[in-house]
Amino acid sequence: MRSPSKLARLYEATESIVTIDKGSAPRILFSGEDLLLEDLPVGTKVIYPRPPIEGLTNVKAAIRQAINHPEGCDPLHARLRPGMKVTVALDDISLPLPPMRTPDVRQQVLEVILPLLADSGVDDVHLVIAICLHRRMTEAEMRRMVGDQIFDAFYPDRYYNHDAEDPKGLVTLGETRHGEKVILNRRAAESDLLIYVNLNLVPMDGGHKSVGTGLTSYEGVKAHHAPGTIKKCHSYMDPARSEMHRSVDRIGRVIDEHLEVFHIETTINNRMFDGPMEFLQKREEDFTDLDRLKLSGLRATLKHLPRAAKRKLFQAVPAAYDVIAVHAGRTEPTHAKILEKSFAQYLVDVDFQADIAVMGIPFISPYNVNSILNPLLVQVMACGYFFNFYRGKPLVKPGGTLIITHPCSDEFDPEHHPSYIEFFHRLLPETRDSDVLQAKYEEEFARNPSYVHMYRTGHAYHGAHPFFMWYWGENGRQHLGRIIAVGADNEHVPRLMGWDSAATLSEAIDMARSVHGRGAQIAMLHHPPIVMTQNLG
Amino acid sequence: MADSPKAAFFDVDGTLVSTNIVHAFAFYAMNQGTIFGTAWRTAKTALSVPALWLLDKTNRKVFNELFYGFYEGQTEDRLRELAGELFREVLRPAIHKGTPHLLDEARRAGCRIVLVTGALDFTVEELARHLGADDLIANRMHFVDGVATGRVIPPIVEGAHKAVVIRDYCVREGIALDRSHAYSDSFSDYPMLAVVGHPAAVNPDLRLRNVARAYEWPILETTEA
């Protein structure tokens, strides 16, 4: 007969939450490009991602099924007429993370719909990457996303990045009843049909956000990328409780009144690691001897490599994501179906709120593909994305402590993030108050001709982007009492962020316990892969 | 101060166009009206190039004095007449593809466009008009009875003096220096870049690129559209 403790362990083997006891294995935490192996205090609840949902066996068949049986409108083929003008907008390289193995799902969708357009006599087709204020994708990245054949046929005249700073390339469609400006890419707005090909990595993506945000300008996006809006999000990974999504939806509905929009939405599972790093998908309890050997080998290799080489090492391994759902049709019913699947992959039910949360910050974010996770992006991962990975109540109690592990190096990519550098070194020493930053400096950065030029002709994020990154941490900052950075290689970065520093995780936990008491509930969100908590109690 | 006017100061040679003042000088040398005049000026120019190059690297002030001396004896009418041709044949084709975009972006940002150059004013006036500049700060040749003396009316616009003339310009025009932008390709313009609130390196030489990296100034490329 199994003892109760053995039964508990058996039960936990199928559950997503593991409670640390005396004999538990140390846990892996990302710390930028390094992997830490840490013993956590007894009683800590470690929340793991759900196992990957089985992928679709035939993605192209699923795409055909979706466009032939769309949600709330006629099938795509029935909406096509010879000689019509069609724009196909695509999500950019910020999704998914890391970039998926080829063929990218966007390529697969295009390989289905482009022949259909051609067969229907639609020759005036442009492919526009909906970058909004993100950096322009490079030629190589664009080629990888759609494959050689489509790239060669469309690039550069009919396959290009949206330009949010081209005065002639934008058109104002109107305003929402809340006064939000609805500005859109002119080519898309003047098309007879706009097809948006999306990839939902997290529940924040997709829906009205695709067109309304991806193809607009600074004027259009600043309506909801604002501190006041973010403060009212609970969380922005849960569109039903997100003020940002309410604003985006209002904008999207105005767009839908003016334009014929056909959405093709897709979502993927969380099979983020593959090949030699596949063991990172497992719980530490389930590691085989070979997995432990691989982990030791990887950690030893990482220890001796320079940071840039480590980055290359991680970025060289594309993710083995599988497509788990494809839906098409009108914006809202299509997105609702995709959201359902996305939540099914990510949500883990919890019935508690922790006093202290521990999160490892990895090397990547949506904003540094093939680049550096600079301090502002570390901040947006901690206070923004990871904090907001909840539905219902946050994982951490109000006033709780968030402990993150990251070196927080004062390192920026001058080509991709030039305005971040000025934001971090000039503005943050003056104030961390988002409202002050917005009122005093946002416009200046957004209009800075150097940043505009680098956005339009180089591969730089827009001048206003670092502000949005700071605002995106706003609800996390408002909610949390304290943030402690573990393993920072300098003093000033955590200090400028308003964080405390600790050399080790145990020191950080002691610091947090000094406030919350010895009996404080500690929780660790074990990601990547992505996991979201759901606490609807 | 938040609403005070601002300006964008642009160096010209290498920054907006791919030519430099020597191109203009050579153009004048090769267009002397008579075969002998042209031959003499061209030969004199060719022979002086190594010395000028050396001086340019060592003493910019002496370089300028010597350089502008080559214009001595030429009539103002002729210099101005040839300036139009210089623009059409030399300067306009040399405008970087990205230059109009950069100027448009500065204009859209509400900046007054000011070109600041060590070239002689009559050689770049047409270019300034073409680019839609609001003002031009350039060196002015001293003429007596319509003939160039080979001396420039002080202060010479170059190096550290560019910072001084920009500062004076801002005081005179009520422009906020700390809200203004400056663009150059050369390390010799470091003072001009350092004096404004928002400096940027454009197609920079190696020294300026290193400085821009160190000071975290934006680095722009305008050679491509």
Image (spheres, grey):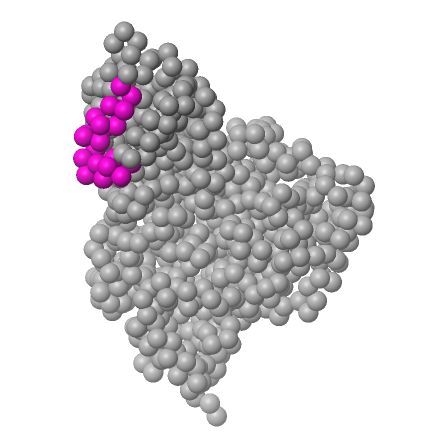
Residue B62 visible in this rendered orientation of the protein: yes
Residue in the foreground of this view, choosing between B72 and A294: B72
Image spot of residue A181 (x, y percent): 53, 30
What is the quadrant of residue B167 in the picture?
A: top left
Q: Please state the extent of the stretch shown in magenta in the rendering.
A: B49-72
Q: Main secondary structure of the magenta part?
A: helix
Q: Is residue A403 above or below residue B6?
A: below
Q: Would you say residue B183 sits in the magenta stretch?
A: no
Tell whether A512 sits left or right of A60.
left
Image spot of residue B88 (x, y percent): 48, 24
Tell whether A160 sits left or right of A406.
right
Residue in the foreground of this view, choosing between B101 and A160: B101
Q: Is residue A339 above or below residue A478?
A: below
Image spot of residue A311 (x, y percent): 39, 64
The residue sitting at 27% across, 39% down in the picture is B50
Residue in the foreground of this view, choosing between A478 and A264: A264
Residue B6 visible in this rendered orientation of the protein: no
